[in-house]
Image: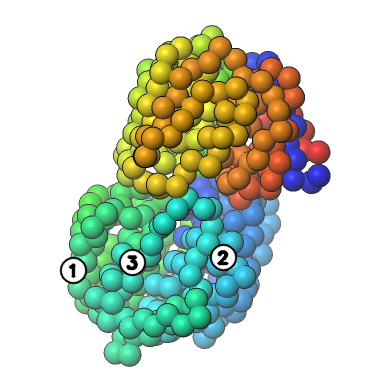
Amino acid sequence: MSDVILVRGGAPLNGAVEVLGAKNAVLKLMVATLLAPGRHVIENAPNILDVEIMGRVLDHVGASCVRSGTTLTIDVPEDPIPEAPLDLVRQMRASILVLGALLARTGEARVALPGGDDFGSRPIDYHIRGLESMGAVFELRHGVLYGTAPDGLHGTEVFLEFPSVGATENLLLAAVLAKGTTTIGNAAREPELTDLAEMLQKMGAKIDGAGTSTIEVHGVGSLEPAVHRTVPDRLEAGTYLVAGAITGGTVTVERCRPEHLRMELRKLADTGCVVDANEDSVTITGPDRPTAVDVATLPYPGFHTDMHPQMVAYLSVADGTSLVTENIYAGRFRYLGELNRMGADIHADGQHVVIRGVDELSGCEIDGCDIRAAAALTIAGLRADGLTTITEAHHVDRGYDGWVDKLASLGATIERA
C-alpha cells in the first residue's frame, strides 16, 4: 500500500509552489563529474528516486555521492571503474550516458543496455555511431555493451539523423576530452543540454554553440572539479500549472524559467487559461472548462513529450475534440486506458491521440504506469468526482520531489496511503 496515492477531486488549487532542479539535467551533471577527479558540488538537486539510482551508479564506478538537503557532493577517484551494472542501468535510461564519459576518461566502458520507462523502441544507434566515428569500438555480449578506444577518442564531424538529446549529451561528454575538434550537427537544443555544457565549461571544457543546432567542442587534456547549480525543472513547473488549470484555480510556480515553457504556456493560453509569466515565476488561472486544442510533441523549443500525458488529462474535460500527435515516443499510450476508466473518451490512432472532451471524470482505481502517467492521472483525479486511487504510484517519485505534499499545500485533498 506504500505505492498508492489517494485523491479526492473537486477542490480548485490555489497558492504558490517552488520547483527544484531538473531531473533531466541533474542526472547528466552527475555523470559529467566522472570526467575529472576530485570533489564536485551540484546544487538545487531534487530528492527523487532517479538521482538516488544515479548516485548508486557513481558509487559502483568508485565515486562517492553524498546529499545534504538539495546539494550533492561527489568525490571522483583518479581511477574510476569503467562499468555500469545491469541492476542499476535497467532502472534508468540516463545511465547510458556513462558510456561517453567513461570512454573519454578511461578509454573503456562496460554498460548494460538501458531500461527506464517503457515507451517503445528508443534505440541508442545514434550514440554508438557517433562514438564509433570518434574512434570507439563496440561489442555486445550477453546484454552488455563493451566499448574501447584503442587509440583514444579523436575529434570528428557528426551529423545526427534526429536531434536526440541523449546522443548529443553522450557525444558532448566524450568530445570534451577527445583530441582535436568535434562538431555535432543537428544537435539537440534543450535547456538541460545547455546546462550540462555550462557545467563542463566550468570544469575547463571548450564548447561553442550549446543551445543551437551546431555544437563545436575543442578537446582539452584534462578537466577540473566544479560547483554548479542545476537549471530549474520546466517539466515539474509545467505539471503544477496544468494541475492548477484543470481545477480552475490560480497557481503560481516560483523559481522556474518560463522561457523554457514557451510552447506549453501558449497551448494552455489557447485553452482559455490566463497566463502571467515573469522572469522566474509564472501564474496560471484555469477556465471553468478548457477549450479544445491540437498539440504536437517536438524537440525543443517545441511542446515537450514529457508534458503529453498531463496535457491529455487536462484536455479530457475540454469543450470539443482535441488531437495530440506524439512525434517522439511511439509507445507512450499505456495510460490512455486508465483515463478512459475514469470516463474519458480517448483513443489512439497510430501516433495520434483523439480526445473527445467529457463533462466530468469519475474517480476509480487506476495504474500509474510511468513517471508522467502517474502525474497525469493524479491531475485527472483532482478534477474527478469522488475518490481516485493511483496504484504503482512509486513511479512519480522518479521525477517529482514532494509531489503529494506540494499538491496538498495548494489545497488538494490528497495523501500517500
Outermost residue toward the top?
Answer: 288
In the image, residue 216 above or below residue 193: below
Read off the residue under disc 2. Answer: 90
Q: Residue at x 28, y 71 (%)?
A: 129
Q: Is residue 204 visible?
A: no
Query: Label 2 vs label 3: CA separation?
Result: 18 Å
Q: Amino acid at mark 2?
A: Arg
Q: Residue at x 63, y 41 (%)?
A: 368
Is the C terminus in the top left, top right, bottom left or bottom right quadrant?
A: top right
Q: Position of residue 52 (x, y in %)?
A: 64, 60
Q: Position of residue 120 (x, y in %)?
A: 45, 53
Q: Secondary structure at mark 1?
A: strand
Q: Secondary structure at mark 3?
A: helix
In the foreground, 180 or 204: 180
Q: Earlier in the sequence, mark 1 or mark 2?
A: 2
Query: Label 1 vs label 2: CA separation?
Result: 31 Å
Left or right of residue 106: residue 411: right
Is the N terminus in the top left, top right, bottom left or bottom right quadrant?
A: top right
Read off the residue under disc 1. Answer: 157
Q: Which mark is residue 388?
A: none
Q: Which mark is residue 125?
A: 3
User: Tag 3: Cα neighbours inside 10 Å, few (<14), some, or many (≥20)?
Assistant: few
In the image, residue 377 above or below residue 23: above
Q: Secondary structure at mark 2?
A: loop
In the image, residue 150 above or below residue 82: below
Nearest to viewer (mark 1 / mark 2): 2
Quick check: marks 1 and 3 in contact, CB under 8 Å?
A: no
Left or right of residue 412: residue 263: left
User: Tag 2: Cα neighbours inside 10 Å, few (<14), some, or many (≥20)?
Assistant: some
Q: Amino acid at mark 1?
A: Glu
